[in-house]
Each structure stands twice: as structure tokens, then as C-alpha cells.
Image: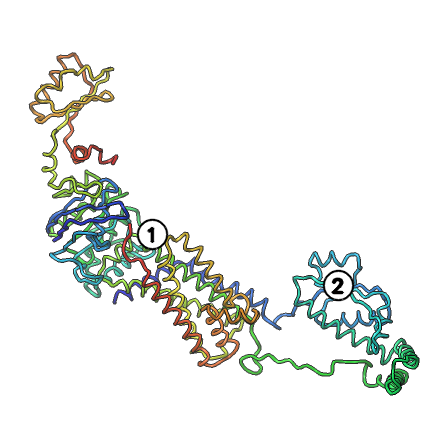
Amino acid sequence: MNAIWALLLKDLKVFFRDRRALLMAFAAPILLGAFMGFLFNGKDHEASKIPVLLVDQDQSPLSIKLAVGLGSDKALELRPSEAAVVRQEIRKGRAVAALLLPKGFGDSATRNFFQSGTKPTLILLVDPSRATEATMLRGLLAQHTMEVVSAEVFGGPSGLSMLKENAEAADQNPNINPAARKALKDLYGNVATLNETGATKGNGAPGMKLPYELKEEEVTAKVGVRYNGYAHSFAGMGVQFILFMGIEGGMALLVLRRSALWKRLRTAPIGRHSILVARILSSAVIAAVLMLGIFAVARMVFGVRIQGSFPGFLLITAAFALFTGAFGLLIAALGRTPEATRGLAILATLVMVMLGGAWVPAFVFPPWLQKFTLVFPTRWALDGLDAMTWRGLGFQASLAPAAVLIGFALVLGVVAWARFPFEENS
Amino acid sequence: MLDVLKIEKAFGTRKAVDGLSLQLRPGEILGLLGPNGAGKTTTVAMIAGLLIPDAGEVRIQGRKIQGDQDPLKRQLGLVPQDMALYEDLTAEENLTLFGALYGLGGKDLEAAKVRVLESVGLHDRRKDSVATYSGGMKRRLNLAVALLHDPALLILDEPTVGVDPQSRNAIFETLEALRAAGKALLYTTHYMEEAERLCDRIVIMDSGRMLAEDTLGGLLTRLPVANVLCVDFDSELTLSAFDGLETEACVSSLTFTRGRLRVGLQDLCLDVPRVLQKLADRGLRWSHLECERSSLENVFLALTGRSLRDA
């Protein structure tokens, strides 16, 4: 049994014998991964509806139809309200937005369907912290408004009256040339005929509709395999807490470096490389065991599967584990005191995991940030794990992330080796 | 076995060891005695190869240690001042680990483990986690680990700090057995009693320098006073009550503090009756008498002007 093997075995015994620490090392990433997976798990749970307040000051048939249309939308939770209270409700976070339909909205909207007169002004009050939902609401509002207004024009009594008025107005407008006047009058006349005869009624409700049916399909590992949000969240939390374990490994070496045990190790006829290599390897083995354990729980409890290459998954796990070992060694090499070093190392780790996409996937970052975060090994680890799990890519897709992680491990290991204070200094 | 030649070591502007030389032979215990901060631990670190001397050199069995993996390091066993054990492991696992680091394995390692565990009286507790041991047991295991690879030179850096009397005696017996087996032991301590009991020769250090090196007897002969007669008085007296006594031929020194008269004498048999007669002649009645043998404490006091315990 050589020195490296003996030291490695010792580190593993010490780690796995501390049951409380072991439980935390497994439990923390699993609990957080489960929670974040639940939040980001797409269709596994019903998406939250956007709470919107509606103040209908018009109370016209058209405004009532618009309210019904918006209320039936699956993305919205529409609640009638009063103008006096909506601002306060938004401030309190009870609603994302409030829509105020002014008096005369129905009449004015119908009138302005074909001509550019004075349009009615709808007021949309929004919570600035919910910009994404507000944008979605604008789109839905446009869709439902167009539907009810066009339905009124093509099939409603006020629409018919508006068409007749428009035809008369076109007749009396001296600024329209005769050919355009005729075309306009024909258009109004034809639409009025449709309105009066109810010709469109046989084909469903009249008016404008979205001219397409949308079929949405998740592009995941294989056709029919649904996206599992837990795959990313477990990878993210696994990476984060394994790096924390790496920090603890570095701290242990830093403490060892200042202890009598270090003197005993250094007095033994073993190369200094044995001590450091054993430490990297033990951290790497522990990291790999943790990652595999975390994904085993994810598989059993949350149905996370390695949809891509399993050897690729193992390769990325091994490369990340090696990086974790080198990261811990670097901490031990550069740290002065455990107290000061721990705080700094945790901060650095949090930045790495945050920008690496462990908390939220990197694709939500702005494009420049997505490019920038490629300098972080955590980004490669997470992209690699995503590729092997829910994206279902092949072994080849694991090679680049693994190579980058191993490269980082080598650089960190060399710097740590060069900077490690082997000699006593006091 | 060990030759230390004019070694020096400074940390910044502070010189921790300044031109120290010493030799240690097989079957000998050399005591390195000095107060905290005297440079003992730095000296030990240089001998063990943990620190590189700024000047001078350390030779073990006639040559310097060359590199981390020099087989010569197998001749060296270190018992650090603080506990150098993995508390989460059992005694046996600690020994297995350190045995492996010294290239021991198989039956040799098993035999070595039994040998050292029995020598420190821990064989029955070998499967218990070190964390469950008392302080004394940990100290004994700390020693056992250093003995595992059967080194010819054993360096013990204050190995009995915080140890109960029973474990201290067990450690002493082990060390005496090692000396009898021909091992060379370098023993640093700031306990004079330990140095007096164990050491064949003693090096007294202070502020990084060697103040004296000799056997205990040799060091004591350097003192102007070999023995001290202590006389306690209950009555209120001042030093003037003893005027003229210091001029007696047999009296080497005389002090009186807090009711105790201390008289330095060369020959107890002849001089004590004379002094007591002189006191009786002055009508002085004492309440208690005792004689103190000179100790390393007196030697340190004579060499530095300070008490070893207060230094």
C-alpha cells in the first residue's frame, strides 16, 4: 500500500465517518435541488396565472365581452375592481397589473376599427418588478380586444351602425378621390351585408381570429420525452454544494498545515507530491460519490434520467470532481488563515455557481453575459450535465466540457503546487 | 547518531536559534531544556527536516537528509508537542496509516502495531476511536506512532504536556526502555524534574543560544552553592537579626524573605550544625527546618539571572 493510497483511504474514512456532515453534504443539494426543480419544472405543475384587475368604467356590451374574453384566458386571473383601489393593490403585490376601460370605450373602439379617428385610451397600470408578465399581458390584451371589436364590426348592431356612418362619411369627404371612395363604400357595404345577413354566423363567431393554430413541442432528448426541470436544478445544486465540500477539503488542508500532524507527515519519507495528490484525489472521489448520489436520488424520486450518454455523464462527473479537488488545493495553497479564507472562498464559489447557471439556467442571461460566463468552469460543468441529462446528447457532447474542466483542474493544481507553503514559517 | 553543527534560524529580525551545536549518541537521552521561546521547537524542526537552517547543518548517522523521500528519514521518529493523530480514526487505523507512510505493510506492520501498542499499554483499546481517549492515552499513542517504524533517533518535543502522573510515568518507562535498547533520544522540555530524571546530558537553551551542556552532576558543580538550608521562623524578624552570619566561612549565601532564612552551604554534614548553633546562640527559635538540593532551576538562575519557570 503506497503513501498516496494510504492518505486517500484515510481522507475517505474521515469524511464518510462523520455522519452528520455526510448527511448535510447529501441533504442540502437534494432539498434545494428539489425546491428549485419544483419552481422551474415547466408543465409538471400548473403555471401561475397572472393576477390582473379590471376596472370597467364603460359597461358597454363590447367592454363586457372583452372582460369575458380576458377572463377566459388560461394565463390570466381577472378580477373586477375599482379605480380608487387598484394602485394600492398593485403596490401591495396583490396584482401584477390593472386595466382601466374608459367610458365610451366600446363605441369609440368600434368606430376606429376602419378609420383613424380619436382612439380610446386604455390605461394599464403595471408592477415594474413583473415586466415579463406585463409584456405578456399587453399581447393578450391586443389579441382579445381585436377579437371582440372585429366581432362587433362583423356581427354586432353597433358595428352595423358604424359601417353605415362610415359609408356616409366617405361620401361626404372631399379629400378622397372617386376610386378610393367607391372602394371604401363597397367595403363598408359588403361588411354591412355580412353583418345583416349573419353570413359568418354559420362558421362560428364573426370577427377576426388568429390566422393559425399553434402546435407547441418541447425539444428534449427524444420525441415524447418531456423536459424534467429537476435535471438542471439537481445539477446546479450538486455543483454548488460539491464545491462547498471542496472548500472544506481545502480548509482541512489549511488546518492540517498548521498542526502537529503536518509535522509528522512531513517527517515521513514521502514526497510532498504524495500529500497533495492524495488530497486532490480524495476530494475528487468524494465529489464524484456525492454527484452520483445526488443524481441517484433525483432519478428515484424525481424521475431525472440520463437521456444522453451515460459514459459522457460519468466523464463530466469525473472531470468536475477533479476540478473540485484542485479548487480545494488552491484554497489551501493561497489561504493564510482558515477563518479569512473560508469567507473569501465561499464568495468566489457563489459567484462561480451563480454565473455558471446553477441557480437559473444560463440561457436567461443577456447574450453578452452568456458569452462571458464561459470563463467559469461551473458553466461548462452545468452545460455538460444538462447535455447528458435532459438534452440527451451523445458522448461527443461531453468531450468539450470535460476537457475544459480538466484543463481548469490542471491549471489550478499547478498554481497550488507552486504556491503551497511546504516549509514551516514560524 | 546526531550531529548538529552551529545551526542558525531567524524569522524576520528575530533570531530563534543562534549557532547551536550538539551531539547525541546511541543509548543516550539528551535533554534540551529551556523556557518557552528558547528555540527548542525550532531546533527540533530543523533536526527533523521541517525547517531549513539559515546556517550550519544537521547530520544523522553522518549525513544530511537529502530531499523528502530520503530513506534516512526512516531513522527518525518525531513526537510533536501537540497531538499528531487523526481523532476520527481508531488507534489501529492511525498506526496503519503512518506505517504505510514509512513503507510498512503486511505482517511487519501488524507485528509493529502490536509491539508499540503493548509498549504504551493501549493494545486493548486499539479498535476505539482516538476521540474517545483521555489526554494521557492520546499522548501515549502519539509516542507509539513515532516508534512504529523502529527509528534509531527519537525526537520528543515536550511529550508530557498536560499528562496525568500515571501516563507520565508510563511514558518515562517507555523512554528508559528505548534508551536501554540503544536508541538515541532528544528530549525537549521546560520541566526540570523530567530532565533531571531522564536525561544523561542536558543542554540548557535560552533566546536561541546554548548556555550550557553537561551531565546533571556536571551542571550542578557549576553552581556556587551546592545545598541550601532553609529555616522558618514564626516570630517577626528582619534581616538584621542575622547580621554577621554571612561572614562565617561555611556560609556561601544568605537571604531572608517572608519568615524564611535560606543559607547556602557547601557541606551539609559539617555546616548545618554550625549554622543552627549560631542561630541558637542569638536566641532565635525556628519553627521548621529543611534542606534543598541544588537543581537545574538554580543552574538556570545562575546562568541567566532569571527563574526557569518565570522566563
Say what secondary structure mark 1 lies in. helix
Mark number for residue B238? none
Q: Amino acid at mark 1?
A: Ala
Say what secondary structure mark 2 lies in. strand
User: Relative to residue B236, is residue B224 drawn left or right?
Assistant: left
User: Relative to residue B29, is residue B158 drawn left or right?
Assistant: right
Q: Residue A160: where, in percent of width, then height?
A: 90, 79
- Chain letter of the residue carrying label 2: A
Q: Which residue is mark 2?
A: A98
Same subunit, labels 2 and 1: the answer reads no
- Chain letter of the residue carrying label 1: B
Q: In this rendering, is residue A361 above or below B287?
A: below
Q: Residue A201: where, in percent of width, then height?
A: 84, 83
Q: Which tag is nearer the camera, tag 2 or tag 1?
A: 2
Front one among B297 and B27: B297
Mark number for residue B131? 1
How are the colours assigned in the image? rainbow
Quadrant in the picture for the C terminus of chain B: top left
Badge 2 crowding class, 10 Å Cα cut-off, few under 14, some 14 to 19, many 20 or more, is many
Q: Amino acid at mark 2?
A: Ala
Front one among A68 and A98: A98
Q: In this rendering, is residue B169 above or below A299?
A: above
Residue at the far left in the pictured view: B270
Q: Residue B210: where, in percent of width, then height?
A: 16, 42
